[in-house]
Amino acid sequence: MERSHKENSKSHKVSKIESEIVTLIERPRICCFDLEAEAVAKLKKSGANIYDGTLGAKITIPNRSKREYHEISLNLSGFPLNLHEYDIIILDLNNFSTIDYEAKDHLSESQTGKSLYKLVSRYPETIFDPRPIVSDLLKQEFSKITNRPSLIIVFSARSYSVDYETIKVTESYSESLDIETYDIYSFYDNIPLADANYGKDVSICEMPDDFYSLLEKYKRNITYDQTFYHPKTLEGSKYIKDQNFFPLIRNINDEIVSYIQFHEKGNLILFPQIKDKSSFLLEFLSKIAPSIFPNLFPYSTSFAWKNETEYWLPKHAFFLKEKEDLQKEYEQKLEENRKKTEHNIAKYSFLHDILTESGEHLVNALIKYLKWLEFVDVQNYDETDTSSTVLEEDIQVILPNGLLIIECKGIGGTSTDSDCSQISKIKHRRCKQRGKFDVLALYIVNHQRYLPPLKRQNPPFTEHQIQDAINDERGLLSTWQLFKLYSDIENGIITKEEARKSILEFGLIEFKPSDLSFVYEPTEFFNNEQVCIVNIENITLNVNDELFIERDGQYTKAQILDIQDNGQSVPQATQGEFGLKLSEKIKKKSTLWKR
């Protein structure tokens, strides 16, 4: 059945709309300054990511007499705010647009401070050209493009400079400042400007065929009015032609009118004026530039056909399959790692909880910790006795020969005297209930819990509080000590049995290895602090023995790798001065111990 006229018309409109949809190519990002509208439109239609900007228009100034002047504010709305994120900058220096001066356009709507700076146009100037000074501001923006390739494409014009006068305006006076001069080429350092000659007769320099063919194609539409010289660089004691500078087009007098210059701070291509810039730029950016600057064109499709199956290179399919298998294997291992990480966090989260939580969450975390320490019977007392209305302990630990009661707090500061001693009252009550003095008491605090533990006050108890705890026969302990204890046990510094015994002591609880013999406190260190001098007596040290390094109450283990007596390696040391090489660094004010 034939479609109706309306259906055909509708289908035609849809097809037309679909054909006009343009897929934006994200990179390179291209910022155009004063490029003709047709060229900008054509580039956008090709999918290029374009910002259309301007260095500004010339301003007609009504300076009619010698005393007359007008204040000028630069309008930088033609700059994208994120210019430093662009990859390619295109400038056309032949901009002849002119606008009339409007005073309202040069007023400061918002001003901070009691003075401001403005440009001034004075008689006899009747045309104010902002482009040279804006060109210098553009250079400052280019300097922000660092650590990545970039490209500046310029359609040249005759070089010229403008003198700019700046005034300082305050609430009571205006002060004229220095005159500063800027050139239309101020956007780039050291442009090798030569004579300002006009002409049309040009020849293309030797270069790769595709680039040569493109320039030849547009040669008849080229005009120039500025020439350039080949810059030189110092190599040794001689000046030679810059090896990063390549002439592209010369005039009939063999003067350079177009060139490309490679530079780590930004590559520069300078073309003469070309009549059909839209077609020229489209061909240059799609066919030539990607081969010269491949890093700037990650999505270039000029030779996309090479990726089609029919054109694959030998073994290409094999390596693609290998890549796919490796990707799958990687994703599987990554998923396994994610699950292991989640399991590990769930398993050991109580170690973070003892440093962050308060109330019931802190109690439950400490119970997990005490069970890990292999206390056999640990109970949440609030769950076992819900009838009591008086303040009771948080945790009970049933011991083979008694009872350990624990009160724990998570607080933002440090403990008061009453916080520390509250557990003593509960201890006396439990002793009376049990009819025996087999009750031990411990106060555990997660102090200053909103601070990182290393920035907390450690230990968090005063000397008075510690002495009172000794007198009352009760213990004081911080959760930060327990956190560090976990690693010491895992690393074999102290055993769980030694830790359980320490928890039952009075005063400030300390966790340290037992049965240690003093070796020496070294003061001389060498070889990146892995060698120290010891003076020993009444102790025997052997190569491969294990020592404990103690500093500020913290212990680490180290193996004796070498023993030297008067520069000679010996297997054993018993009496006198020796050099020890250890498997770990030993810092000043450290003490050596041996078990």
Image (cartoon, rainbow, N blue to C red):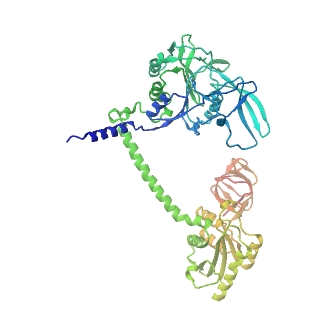
- Do we see residue 549 in this rendering? no
Q: Residue at x 77, y 70 (%)?
A: 463
Residue 493 drawn at (x, y percent)? 63, 63
Counting the numbered discs, the total is: 0
Say left or right for 218 vs 57.
left
Say left or right for 298 vs 197.
left
Locate residue 512: give its quadrant.
bottom right
Say left or right for 443 vs 321.
right
Residue 459 drawn at (x, y percent)? 71, 66
Q: Residue at x 49, y 24 (%)?
A: 277
Please say if 142 is above or below 219.
below
Residue 497 drawn at (x, y percent)? 60, 71
Residue sticking out furthest to the right: 172
Residues 363 and 405: in front is: 363
Residues 518 and 83: in front is: 83
Residues 417 and 62: in front is: 62
Quadrant where the N terminus sits is top left
Residue 409 drawn at (x, y percent)? 65, 72
Quadrant where the C terminus sits is bottom right
